[in-house]
Image: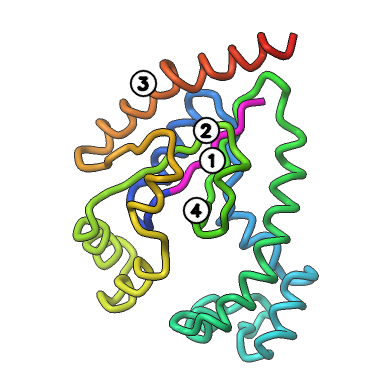
């Protein structure tokens, strides 16, 4: 299978790119969704998080209280590293399980927000980055996600820079137009780069 790593700055438009790739025929593994799955009630992941951060990060129903946990780790590099050390291996293991189920002639897209930060670019045949100007991303985070401006700026600062992501990318899509324009760019990329790459890989394996 062709392995595509998808990443981008927060609120750059990565979700639309992922959905469009699925419409084109890709199999999507979403790291954010897996990060929620591995800390569901009753999982070893949630138990490890509680052991590291205490019971105050649990909601009344026993599930993870994400805002409470975010308040503990954001802005504290040491505590964030502890959390990442618990979550990231679990997510990678689950992603590998799902990837093993993709047909040999398929195209797997792994949506990984921290792909560059966690040094995973080399694990993929093709790295696709989605970018948008920082002021646009801040506006989206405040308007669409209800975040305070300071919190939004902190989230952006905690990620790799656009330059760092570009260094790891095979293609950078700049989301500065309409959603329709971004989706059209993704479809062109699928037809002109990803499908031919996958076909070449299949021929080479025969």
Which callout, 2 or 4, points at the residue further toward the start of the chain? 4
Residue 14 lies, in percent from the top left, at 40, 46
Task: Identify the residue position indicated by label 3 in the image.
Answer: 188
Residue 181 lies, in percent from the top left, at 25, 31
* Residue drawn 33% across the image and 76% down it: 151
Task: Identify the residue position indicated by label 4 in the image.
Answer: 116
Q: Is residue 164 above or below residue 71?
A: above
Check residue 126 in the rendering and tell me which mark sits there, or answer none: 2
Q: CA distance from mark 1 to mark 3?
A: 17 Å
The quarter of the rendered structure image containing the N terminus is top right
Q: CA distance from mark 2 to mark 1?
A: 6 Å
Q: Nearer the viewer, mark 1 or mark 3?
A: 1
Q: Are marks 2 and 1 in contact (CB under 8 Å)?
A: yes
Task: Identify the residue position indicated by label 1 in the image.
Answer: 5
Question: Could you tell me which secondary element the residue under label 4 belongs to?
Answer: loop
Q: CA distance from mark 3 to mark 2?
A: 15 Å
Q: Residues within 10 Å of mark 3 (few under 14, many from 20)?
A: few
**What segment carries the magenta color?**
1-7
Which callout, 3 or 4, points at the residue further toward the start of the chain? 4
Q: CA distance from mark 2 to mark 4?
A: 13 Å
Q: Is residue 23 above or below residue 35?
A: above
The quarter holding residue 202 reads top right
Q: Is residue 151 above or below residue 121?
A: below
């Amino acid at each position: 299978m062709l392995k595509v790593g998808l990443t981008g700055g927060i609120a750059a438009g990565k979700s639309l790119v992922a959905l469009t790739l699925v419409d084109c025929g890709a199999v999507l593994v979403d790291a954010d969704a897996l990060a929620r799955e591995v800390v569901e009630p009753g999982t070893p992941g949630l138990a490890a998080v509680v052991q590291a951060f205490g019971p105050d990060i649990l909601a009344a129903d026993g599930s993870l209280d994400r805002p409470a946990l975010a308040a503990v780790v954001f802005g504290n590099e040491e505590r964030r590293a502890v959390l990442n050390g618990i979550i990231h291996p679990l997510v990678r293991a689950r992603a590998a399980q799902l990837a093993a189920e993709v047909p040999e002639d398929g195209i797997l897209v792994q949506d990984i927000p921290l792909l560059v930060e966690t040094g995973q670019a080399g694990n993929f045949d093709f790295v696709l980055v989605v970018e948008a100007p920082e002021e646009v991303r801040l506006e989206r985070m405040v308007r669409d996600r209800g975040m305070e401006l300071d919190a939004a700026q902190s989230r952006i600062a905690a990620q790799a820079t656009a330059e760092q992501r570009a260094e790891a990318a095979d293609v950078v899509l700049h989301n500065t137009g309409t959603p329709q324009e971004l989706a059209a760019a993704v479809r062109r990329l699928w037809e002109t780069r990803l499908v031919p790459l996958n076909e070449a890989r299949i021929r080479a394996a025969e």
